[in-house]
Image: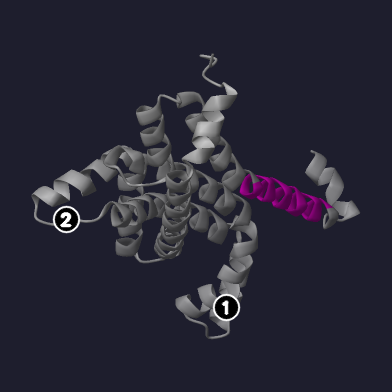
Amino acid sequence: MRSSSPFALWRFESLLQNSEPLLGGLLRTILVATLALLLALAIGIVIGLFSTSQNRILKGMARIYVEFFQNIPLVIQIFFMYNGLAMAGLVLSEFTIGVIGVGLYHGAYIGEVVRAGILAIPKGQTEAAYSQGFDYIQTMRYIVLPQTIKIILPPLANQAVNLIKNTSVLAIIAGGDLMYTADSYASSSLNYGPAYLVAGLVYFILCYPLAIFAKRYEEKLKRRDIATVTPLDLPEVIE
């Protein structure tokens, strides 16, 4: 007689025998996350540059974008792209909605990360670049952004982790992602325990290395900053 436990061995065996849809969902999740991250990075860099620009119009545009996407839940944005745009005559595939929706959403957060990284660079370096004849774009490209990358890597890695997890929102529009395929299998087989447990473990395997990288790199930066403090600076730092 089979055990009725939600985590009985036979349930996991059944999951293994029907793992092909889950593997397909995993590949779709990875592809959506990769493309959405590239889009978010591109948007984030532009938003970060606009936010630190001397042009008030560009600053205002960046602020509006950030506030809009940060203060509306991602699930509502996905529903709007899936249902609202379709009613307006623009029908997008679930895959496209996942890439664009998640990318636009996280672009706002990465924009804030880039902005903070740019502002962390001493103003003296920017002024020195201007004195050498560099314009704003050249200063950002050759002086500021190369240094900013090292500073923002930890928060960028954390954003990548959040982005991967947020691809699961596609399950609400039958996006064919890992969460959707796991939920579909669980509903059809009633093996909820193994389906959700395995899906959670897969998300953990995808996200944990990035989280560890962010933590260790941040600790490395802190150790480097401490090592560069001279003895004369220590009393002032301690105070």
Residue 197 seen by the camera? no
Mark closer to the observer (1, 2): 2
Label 1 or label 2, whichever comes before in sequence order? 2
Mark 1 residue crowding within 10 angstroms, few (<14) / some (14–19) / many (20+): few
The residue drawn where x is 53% and y is 76% is: 141
Residue at 30 percent across and 37 percent down: it is 172
Q: Is residue 29 left or right of residue 207?
A: left
Q: Which residues are magenta?
A: 209-226
Q: Secondary structure at mark 1?
A: helix
Dividing the image into 4 quarters, which one contains the C terminus?
A: top right
User: Does residue 181 appear in the picture of this structure?
Assistant: yes
Write down the residue under mark 2.
91
The picture places residue 101, in percent across and down from the top left corner, at 32, 51
Q: Amino acid at mark 1?
A: Tyr
Where is residue 45? Give x, y as percent.
Answer: 45, 64
Q: Is residue 211 magenta?
A: yes
Percent of width and height locating residue 168: 41, 41
Q: Which mark is residue 142?
A: 1
- The foreground one among 92 and 183 is 183
Mark number displayed over residue 50:
none
Between marks 1 and 2, how big is the CA–CA gap? 41 Å
**Residue 60 is covered by the magenta coloring:** no
Give the residue drawn at x 28%, y 44%: 78
Most foreground residue, 101 or 235: 101
Front-lying residue, 213 or 209? 209
Neighbor class of circle 2 (other Cα within 10 Å; few <14, some 14-19, many 20+) is: some
